[in-house]
Image: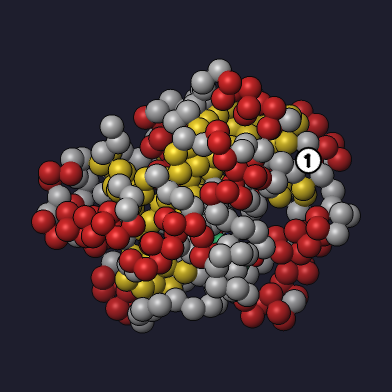
Amino acid sequence: MPCTVIAGGFWGDEGKGKILSYLALKDKLDFCVRTGSVNAAHTIWHEGKRYALHMVPGGFVHPKCRLLIAPGSNVHVAQFIKEVEETQVHKRVAIDNQASIIEEKHSNQDKTSAHLKGLGTTGWGVGPAIEERVRRTAKLAKDIPELKNYLTDVPTEINRALGQNKKVLLEGTQGLLLSLYHGSYPYVTSRDTSASAICSEAGVGPTKIDDVIVVLKSFITRVGTGPLPGEMAKEEATKRGWFETAAGTGRDRRSAPFNLELAKKATAINSATQIALTKLDCLYPESKAAKTYEELPKEAKQFIKDIETQTHTPVTLIGTGPNALDLIDRRK
Ligand code: IMP
Ligand code: MG
């Protein structure tokens, strides 16, 4: 802080929602800026309720946090309105005038394209919506009457806030290995998902960024098609307690063990200053709900040390359970 970027390091679903909600509450975030589009769902447990947010920034858990949706993002109007109701954030959420709009026709195009089906897209229509933006025929947020009361200029708000030393978090979506540039093309999403792209979508330059936290899960999952090194059968994943279904689409997630080479790539391309490691309790059940590093079993400590040595990046936040506060915070 004051300006931190959160980026996924693998194929999304690393647990960014949990890390975001913890930081929002613990650091009392002033601003949380969501990037990307509706294809990504961030799962957040808050006051006993589970939220799978596709549009509203995860910082909503802190009642004083201003919630912004970036100019580079792509907004699904009905989903946005629904989540604003669900989270009751009418008075503190806003969308940049220039954010582009995803429509029903884009979802139809996504679902009926044999090519996109082959990639295993989420079906929300994000690829076709971005194509339309690049063609320069897309609708923008400022063109939509239902959004009239929610419009703002996000870069102006954030840059002013940073000038006043306010705490700003830029919320990335998905993960590096789904990046249009750095991922396993063509089995990728329709945008760059790296920390630099998150800044660009939000309207903040790299010299204003104090920290880049790359979120890595203690094992790897992937939905949709494309390569997954070390992929294991669903039965094996279930036995190990790694089997998950997607928060957004409900599809089965494929799974594989943690991969140091991929972790090195993710921390390098994102220029990570810190790593948040989630779901350590799924790998080492004895670490469940641990609140201090000292409580962790020896094997878990060694796993963390190996990650730090190989990536040259400190593991500062360690998730040990689903609640926002099941977390070891080693930040200074
Ligand atoms: P699209 O982004 O819907 O076009 O899907 C392209 C690829 O990205 C597919 O493999 C999807 O499963 C994957 N994908 C998109 N968003 C997410 C996400 O938030 N989490 C995990 N995978 C995603
Ligand atoms: Mg997700």
Q: In this view, which residue lies farthest toward the right? A: 137
Picture residue at 70% right of the left edge, 60% below the top:
126
Q: Is residue 122 left or right of residue 304?
A: right
Res 89 → quadrant: top right
Compared with 60, 120 (above or below) is below
Secondary structure type for disc 1: loop
Picture residue at 78% right of the left edge, 69% below the top:
109
**Residue 47 visible in the snapshot:** yes
Q: Amino acid at mark 1?
A: Gln
The quadrant of the rendered image in which ligand 1 is seen is bottom right
Q: Which residue is mark 1?
A: 98
Nearer the observer, 238 or 30: 30
Q: Is residue 3 left or right of residue 203?
A: left
**Quadrant including the C terminus:** top left
Picture residue at 26% right of the left edge, 74% below the top:
239
Local packing at callout 1 (Cα closer than 10 Å; few below 14, some 14-19, many 20+) is many
Query: Residue 320, how many percent across, how many down?
Result: 26, 49
